[in-house]
Amino acid sequence: MPNPLLLSPSGEARGSLPYNFPDDPPATLRVTFAEWRSDFPHRIDLYLSDPRASGNRALPALHWSSKEKKFASDQDGDS
């Protein structure tokens, strides 16, 4: 199953979530929009509740890149 897309109001893809939302059994993803500027979030915090061996954990945040016009994690090298 593909990862959920983050879409603009016009329907353009602006990034994706690393897990299905709101859940990817047996895990559950919590998404929090932060760093609001001009009524637009510039960071998306992700927290995975996971009963498997890897356990509950914060995932790398997604940051808005004005240059790229998309959300990406620091691990992607696009922020």
Image (cartoon, helix red, strand yellow):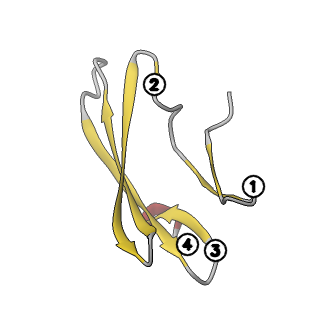
Extreme residue in the front direction: 39
Say the numbered circle drawn on residue 28: none
Residue ID for mark 4? 78
Position of residue 59 relative to residue 35, above or below, is above
- Provide the residue designation for mark 3: 69
Q: From the viewer's perspective, is residue 73 above or below residue 19? A: below
Q: Secondary structure at mark 1?
A: loop
Name the image quarter holding the N terminus: top right
Of the residues under marks 2 and 4, which one precedes in the sequence? 2
Q: Position of residue 41 (x, y in %)?
A: 43, 66
Q: CA distance from mark 2 to mark 1?
A: 23 Å
In the rendered structure, the answer to whether residue 9 lies left or right of residue 22 reads: right
Earlier along the polypeptide chain: callout 1 or callout 3?
Answer: 1
Mark 2 or mark 4, whichever is nearer to me: 2
Mark 1 vs mark 3, CA separation in Å: 13 Å
**Which residue is disc 1 drawn over?**
11
Q: Is residue 5 left or right of residue 33?
A: right
- Which element carries disc 4, helix, strand or loop? loop
Q: The residue under label 2 is which amino acid type?
A: Asp
